[in-house]
Amino acid sequence: MKQQLMAAGFVLFSFMLPLKASAGTFGIDSIYVFGDSLSDTGNVFAASGQTIPPPPYSQGRFSNGPIWIEELAQKLELDSSPTPYINVVNGATPKNGINFAFGGATTTSINTVSPLLPGLQQQIGAFAQPLIQTNQKADSNGLYVLWAGANDYLPTDANPNYFQPFTDTTQTINNLKTAVASLASVGAKNILLVNLPDLGLTPRAQNFDPTLPVPNGTSQILSDLTEQHNEDLSKVIEDLDNVLAPDVKLISFDVNSVLEDVIDRPSKYGFKEVTKPCLFDQSIPSCAIDQSKQDEYLFWDGIHPTTTAHKIIGDRAFQTIAKSAQPVPEPSTALGTLGIGTLGAIAFMKYKRKKSLLTATSQVPNVQSTLTKKVKVGC
């Protein structure tokens, strides 16, 4: 069935409609997102016939409201967040880019929610391959967001014969390195790479998630993996900076430090609970329906932040981009100051409509119907 999904939707349309795009802050006119449930604004929801995630999750987000990429789009002065990929396959016109992120995606081709859904590798391929086949280039003024890896390590209820969480960071880091190189090879110029928050501090890792109990010691194992992952990712960014074209800007967003500060100083951010998840906190049974209570929690469920936390993440991502966009001073006046340069001028690539989209779109409803029947609700 995964091959059917690939045929139906993950051989990306080889065009972009020639819409006029207004550049937002720093000249960014679109966002292309690759990753998992932390960035999914409705792909799994649409593919599952609007059943995953179920209420009280909010409108297809794996949270209780808007997520960080929506906050980032707003701060970049785009009039909406990028269109979910499944919506584009079903005929929607892409606006302000495309969100390819699917809940459950690992950095491999495996998705822990369902084998019908894509991993990171298919997401990157869905974007890059049609550009290669049609000899086109990616939008040079787009922002390309890559945040993946958590599902490679987190405990899951997926069949162990299908996927077992990694106990080493090597494959994950190599997959991310390949993804960045693939994006750069088709013309992506501004790539935002996000590291991992401390997975050992999630409610699931600390056995505050009754939907998936974990063995003792899981928290420390995940914290160690997170630390190694983030160290390795920093080295990869340094290495890629030395080999990619000079006009490719790799922007490193340290979300781990952001959330560590939230956990260390919760009152600074308005949180009262940074350990237990809102959905499963038996001491506050109304949390699932009480917005005022939800705003006091860092975690919505066992692994996903609340919309309040997502807003913080989106704001810090914007600050990171702003810092990277500062012009490089003349060496004589500011030696040693790091800068990545102002992002490019307004541009929006025009792509040619191909019959392949029409063929793919006609097949998608069958895939969605099958997914709705077979996929177990989960993260």
Image: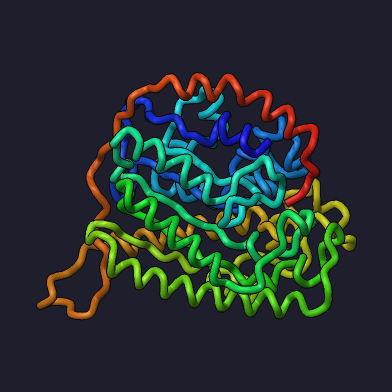
- Residue 376, position in %: x, y? 80, 43
- Residue 284, position in %: x, y? 86, 59
Q: Does any portion of residue 346 appear in the rendered image? A: yes
Please give the name of the residue rendered at 77% of the width and 40% of the height, measured from the top-left corner. 375
Please give the name of the residue rendered at 71% of the width and 48% of the height, measured from the top-left corner. 113
| 291, 97: nearer the viewer | 97
- Residue 59, position in %: x, y? 67, 37
Q: How is the image coloured?
A: rainbow
Task: Examine the image and state in which quarter residue 21 appears.
Answer: top left
Q: Residue furthest left?
A: 332
Task: Examine the image and state in which quarter residue 169 appears.
Answer: bottom right
| Position of residue 315 in the picture relative to residue 283 (left or right) | left
| Position of residue 19 in the picture relative to residue 345 (left or right) | right
The quadrant of the image that shows the N terminus is top right
Please give the name of the residue rendered at 80% of the width and 50% of the height, measured from the top-left corner. 288
Please give the name of the residue rendered at 48% of the width and 75% of the height, measured from the top-left corner. 232
- Residue 65, position in %: x, y? 65, 46
| Position of residue 351 in the picture relative to residue 125 (left or right) | left
Relative to 264, is 31 above or below? above
Relative to 82, is 240 above or below? below
Q: Does any portion of residue 278 appear in the rendered image? A: no
Task: Examine the image and state in which quarter residue 306 appears.
Answer: bottom right
Q: How many marks?
A: 0
